Image (spheres, grey):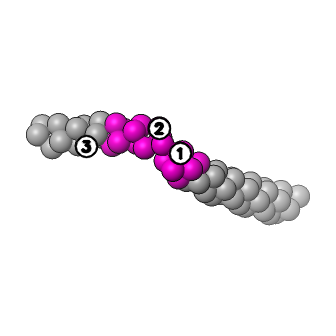
Amino acid sequence: MKKVLWFSAGIAVGFVIAHQLNQTAQGKKAFGSIEAKVKDFSDAFVEGYHERESELRSSIGGATK
């Protein structure tokens, strides 16, 4: 139970610090950069997923016909 308390306290402190950093110009720039990188990664991941799904569907479709 003590570990859960410390874990929760760490998360809360992290949110408070992130909120304080986001109030500064440098913090907004840093979070904007992180957000852009995460978006690029997720877009690439989704694109790769859809490409692979198409490949698998075409191979299954070709095998059954």
Q: Residue at x 69, y 58 (%)?
A: 44
Q: Identify whether 19 is placed above or below 65.
A: above
Residue 23, numbered label: 2
Per the image, is 9 magenta?
no
The tag earlier along the polypeptide, 1 or 3, is: 3
> Observer-nearest residue: 22 or 7?
22
Residue position marked by numbered label 1 in the rendering: 25
Residue 29 placed where, x, y %?
56, 50
Local packing at callout 2 (Cα closer than 10 Å; few below 14, some 14-19, many 20+) is: few
Q: Is residue 9 visible?
A: yes
Question: Going by the image, does 57 lie left or right of 49?
Answer: right
> What stretch of residues is rendered in magenta?
14-32
Q: Residue at x 43, y 44 (%)?
A: 21
Question: Going by the image, does 15 lie left or right of 56?
Answer: left
Residue 41 placed where, x, y %?
63, 57
Residue 10, numbered label: 3
Q: Nearer the viewer, mark 3 or mark 2?
A: 2
Q: Secondary structure at mark 3?
A: helix
Residue 61 placed where, x, y %?
83, 57
Question: In the image as oriented, which residue stretches furthest toward the right?
Answer: 65
Question: Going by the image, does 8 lie left or right of 61?
Answer: left
Residue 7 placed where, x, y %?
23, 43
Q: Main secondary structure of the magenta part?
A: helix
Q: Quadrant of residue 14?
A: top left
The tag earlier along the polypeptide, 3 or 2, is: 3
Instruction: Name the residue type under label 2.
Output: Gln
